[in-house]
Image (tube, rainbow, N blue to C red):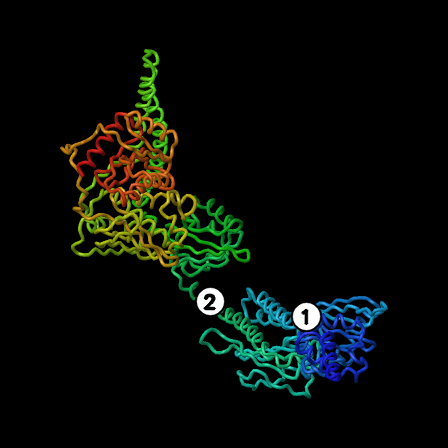
Amino acid sequence: MGQEHGMAAAVSDLRDIFPGDSEMAREMRGRDWAATPLGDPRNWREGLKIPLRMLLTSRFEMWLGWGPELNFFYNDAYIPTLGIKHPVMLGRPLQEVWSEVYADVADQVARVRNGEATWNKALLLLLERSGFPEETYHSFSYSPLQDADGSVGGLLCIVTEETERVISERHLDTLRRLGLALAGKTDEAAVIQAVQSVLGLDRRDFPFALMQLADGKGAISFHPDSDGLRSLEWDHPADGRVFPLNAKTDWPAGPWAIAPRDAMIVPIPGAPDQPAMGSLILGLNPYRMGDGKIGDFATLLATQIGGALANTATLDRERQRADRVWSHARDLMVVVGTDGIFQSVSPAWTRILGHDVADVIGRHFDDFVLPDDSSSTAQALDEAIHEGDLTGYENRFRTADGGCRWISWHTSMEDGLAYGYGRDITEQKRGLEQLALAEDALRQSQKMEAIGQLTGGVAHDFNNILMAVHSGLELIRKRIESDPQVERLIANGLKATERGAALTQRMLAFARQQELQTEDVDLRQLVLGLMDLLQSSLGPAFDIRTRFPPGLPCVHADTNQLEMALLNLVVNARDAMPEGGTIDICADLRELAAGDVPDLGAGPFVQLTVADRGRGMDHATLARAADPFFTTKGVGKGTGLGLSMVHGFARQLGGALQLESTLGRGTLAHIWLAPDKAQSPALVPADSEAELPVGSRQVVLAVDDDVIILMNTAALLEDLGHEVLEASSGAEALQIMQARPDVSLLVTDQAMPGMTGSQLIQHLRADRPDLPVILATGYGETPVGDGPLVHRLGKPFNQAELQRAIEASTRAAVAG
């Protein structure tokens, strides 16, 4: 019994020294330490036991050495670093454990023995933990361990292996530098030089590298000490990744003490579905044997090289194609120096202008440009050289027979020379006196529309001011005692507001533009009637195609305005295709469901479409295309009001403008119009004989975002004997309607932020379809109501007009 108790106590003592159930804790408890110079662990000094407990309970890589020989202790996290030396090296002297690198750290060990701590960041250590020297990197600190008497009894090392990080970052840096070196290389020789500069700089991964191109140019060595590599056999299969090197050959070793034992052959990929463009032979780092990732790294290098070589091959083909284009292009191509001298001109010069090419090269442009265009041409060339490329610059050149031709130029600068591309636009110039006049009329119409919008906005705000003044004067007249002088002043004020209201009505009439003269329009006949004008004006570079199905109904529209809208869309299509192309004009009868087209309800509509195959619009541009003053045509080339005019015209007819576009694929512009005989909702006759309780007191909800107008409207209603609830927004009005189901009349402004009066009415119709509504608005364009239950009241209004509106809306509700 005593012996068993003694054994249990011994085990308990060892668990106190070697705590935990880790692999190394169990290994240390099972080791016969009495047979080592360290002796029985129960007799070890506290200077060793304390850090040993910390080491065994930590998940960080740690080891410690104790005693004169720094006998080696380590934890589980350090086992991978030790490799095949585990667990044999437990308790062995440090110099024996890491004999291969001890010389690299011996000076630091000596400093620690003197009580100094050391630190190393990603130190290169060639460790033999797998049976061969291996390139590794470790960040670690050496800290002295003090004994009870204050002397240094050992050292503690906390270590982090950073081999994978260091080598991965090295690979990424090589790939980055190779990518930068290859960027912009335009020929094969430049690509080879770039690869040589990168692979010859850091040779730790590949002590030597060669490249064999498939075009038979032979092997290219990338290192100054590897000329002998040119004799290397290249008969290994392209898919043979790694092969041994002849040990008798003195291979370049790069920064390492020993030469590579193996090499890798990697194909340089060509373009997709094309054979390899060559091969790379790469000597492998002798200290990274078995590195499974080196093949992926080599493949990435080869891919970058292959991409650069493919680009140069493509550029070579493009140069050849450019030569063919230069020789056979129907348009002018020229190269002009900064002095205005023609360096080169394409054969098209002779075909277009009649001069022999040899007579043009070496001469100044002044010898060929019309005198009237000489100054502007010199200015344009200076702009192209110093400020930016020309786009669509036009001038006139003399022909060999004494005539002249209009040329439209686009330029770009390269190496101090202006490269010009000129298109003969003479025929377009002649066909454009007529389109220009139409465009002038269109621009004038657009300007008038913009002025109308501004005028309408001013008139609306002025109406609100007049409304407050007029209603206030009316109520004051009722509440003050009779005074002739005050009465005259109030009367003059009311007359002034009436004159102001008349002025705003004229402004609103202007803002609505001219009155539409609507009639039944045959779209096919209308387009065919414009074809001569459109086709001759656009010129031979454009082809207009039309399609109209048989039986297409007429539309109810203003013929002149519809022609202007169509012309506007065709001009936009032309501008989207500066090189020319096909413009389609077609129409169809479509049955729309609710929500198919924004702003349109369900029912039959005629869709008139103008389609181009131009540059198209991205999502952001498409979203703003119909906004007033928005344009993508550049300064002075568009007002930005054309599409907004078409939009307003279509909306005024009860239709809509819809744009569909994809960047790079063109644009579809649809004008939706109601077909002939479209029926309007029937109105309740004004002389309905239904009983009308006009004198009864009502609960009225007044809604207006203008506090002054809201207050005066409420005062007018209360003066008429009604109970008035007030709301300053549509959202607040909806809340009041939920709380007060006894509201019998709604008086609302139209133009309110967040929710318009029309939108408020739509929200209320779900629960109160029979609620009479007075829609007060100062805008010239009357919102579309929902039948006789919505009565429009123009701003400014007086109390009598408000009373009549209440009577009319109440009468309609009773009749309904």
Q: Which residue is mark 2?
A: 318
Q: Position of residue 642 (x, y in %)?
A: 34, 44
Name the quadrant containing residue 667.
Answer: bottom left
Relative to 274, residue 537 above or below:
above
Q: Residue 383 vs residue 614: left or right?
A: right
Relative to 72, residue 744 above or below:
above
Q: Position of residue 530 (x, y in %)?
A: 24, 48
| Camera-side residue of 677 and 770 | 770
| Camera-side residue of 326 and 642 | 642
Between circles 2 and 1, the one closer to the viewer is 1
Which sits earlier in the primary sequence, circle 2 or circle 1?
A: 1
Count the labels in the image: 2
CA neighbours of label 1 inside 10 A, class few (<14), some (14 to 19), many (20+): few
| Camera-side residue of 227 and 465 | 465
Residue at point 63% right, 80% down?
283
| Camera-side residue of 109 and 269 | 109
Q: Which residue is mark 1?
A: 58
